[in-house]
């Protein structure tokens, strides 16, 4: 830390993104990216916009928001487009939270956004089976953020459970982070017309194969979106760049391609779960594009290291409650076969 770093941030622990090593080509199952490339229209859109980069992007992302509104059955004024859903989450913390609650095991960026913005936060323990008890959030009287499906567990709350939380906290915003909703969860977007305190956030990074383009969005009441725009226009009005906005529009035209890819991921997830269980793993029932698994046959940290030696990257967290587990992104069938083959070899070596 330099001597110039402001006192305000001196104790800030930043988020640690999943590793992106350059030393060799890995089977990359550590950051929940899609194994499938973007659809052909996306490349064309990016190429077209390359020649127009002398112009700023549309600060309203009008074309993109209009398409998103059509797909999700809301008005364009109920949609905000952002530079990855991390951005709208940070904006929402800034705009709506004096105090915020979220589960003890969840997306690691929530405590960072809270610290960054000086917001006191409560971490509510998941139940022993790693599920969220919705009753812990009923009448909480604080801003709430819940990832649904949750990460890194992959477990979902039902729409009814989400509604109960939203309905019982009318004086606070409830943020539902649906980064992984396209892999089998039920979206709370259908509740936004009923509850003006509900903000749903989504991303193009997972189901729509565009993690590198940085595109996310939020859907809520017109008033919530207006507040988020006040924050956005006070930080970076051109937050979505020109290439990304057009890439996003093109992806939405080819939405069927992405939804078909999600079905493949779900099938591969079920196959991988079965294979891991057959090898003696406990696998949480995931509704996301990853599984969270542990086995008594090998330490979680050791499995991560051994897989990496064999060219397969998964995500291991050192937090006490989940250190036995690894989070494994679901890729193509070929990648999952490579994973299972490597795990078999590692477990066999263990028993020699
Ligand atoms: N929410 C959750 C639960 C996530 O796991 C991620 C991905 N790291 C995000 C939000 C943010 O994704 P992005 O900024 O790429 O949209």
Image (spheres, helix red, strand yellow):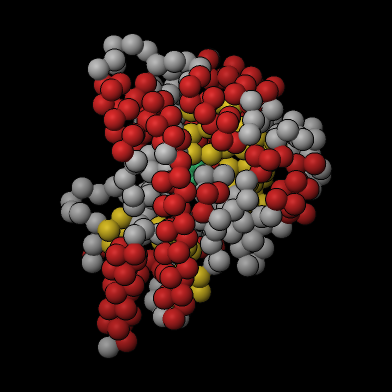
At 41% across and 25% down in the image, what residue appears? Answer: 245
Residue 129's image quarter? Answer: bottom right
Judging depth in this view, the residue of 112 and 262 nearest the camera is: 262
Q: Position of residue 210 (x, y in %)?
A: 38, 39
Q: Nearer the viewer, residue 251 or 316?
A: 251
Where does residue 306 sit, x and y in percent of width and height?
Answer: 28, 69
The residue furthest bottom is 352
Q: Give the residue drawn at x 57%, y 44%.
A: 178
Q: Identify which residue, 351 or 257, lies in the foreground.
A: 257
Q: 47 or 223: which is nearer to us?
A: 47
62 up-or-down from 122: above or below? above
Q: Would residue 186 appear left or right of 61 to someone viewing this image?
A: right
**Can you give x and y, in whole percent of width and height, for residue 208 in the image?**
42, 42
- Quarter occupied by the N terminus: top left
Q: Quadrant of the C terminus?
A: bottom left
* Residue name at image x 63 percent, y 34 percent: 73
288 w.r.t. 9: above or below: below
């Amino acid at each position: 830390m330099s001597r110039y770093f402001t006192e305000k941030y001196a104790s800030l622990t930043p988020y640690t993104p999943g590793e992106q090593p350059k030393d060799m080509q890995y089977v990359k199952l550590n950051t929940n990216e899609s194994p499938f490339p973007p659809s052909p229209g996306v490349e064309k859109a990016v190429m077209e916009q390359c020649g127009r980069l002398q112009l700023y992007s549309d600060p309203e992302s009008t074309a993109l928001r209009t398409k998103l509104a059509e797909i999700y059955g809301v008005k364009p004024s109920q949609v905000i487009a952002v530079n990855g859903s991390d951005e709208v989450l940070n904006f929402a913390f800034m705009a709506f939270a004096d105090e915020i609650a979220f589960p003890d095991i969840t997306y690691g960026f929530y405590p960072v956004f809270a610290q960054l913005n000086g917001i006191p936060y409560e971490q509510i323990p998941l139940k022993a089976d790693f599920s969220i008890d919705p009753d812990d959030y009923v009448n909480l009287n604080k801003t709430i953020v819940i990832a649904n499906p949750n990460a890194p567990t992959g477990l979902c709350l039902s729409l009814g459970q989400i509604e109960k939380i939203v309905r019982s906290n009318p004086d606070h915003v409830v943020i539902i982070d649906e980064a992984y909703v396209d892999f089998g969860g039920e979206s709370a977007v259908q509740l936004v017309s009923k509850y003006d305190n509900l903000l749903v956030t989504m991303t193009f990074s997972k189901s729509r194969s565009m993690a590198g383009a940085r595109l996310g969005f939020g859907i809520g009441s017109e008033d919530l979106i207006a507040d988020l725009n006040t924050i956005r226009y006070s930080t970076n009005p051109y937050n979505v760049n020109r290439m990304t906005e057009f890439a996003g529009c093109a992806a939405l035209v080819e939405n069927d391609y992405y939804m078909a890819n999600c079905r493949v991921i779900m099938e591969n997830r079920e196959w991988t779960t079965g294979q891991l269980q057959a090898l003696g793993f406990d696998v949480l029932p995931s509704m996301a594009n990853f599984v969270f698994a542990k086995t008594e046959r090998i330490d979680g940290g050791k499995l991560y290291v051994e897989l990496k030696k064999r060219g397969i990257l998964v995500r291991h967290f050192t937090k006490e409650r989940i250190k036995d587990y690894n989070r494994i992104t679901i890729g193509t069938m070929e990648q999952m076969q490579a994973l299972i083959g490597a795990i078999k070899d590692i477990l066999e070596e263990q028993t020699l």
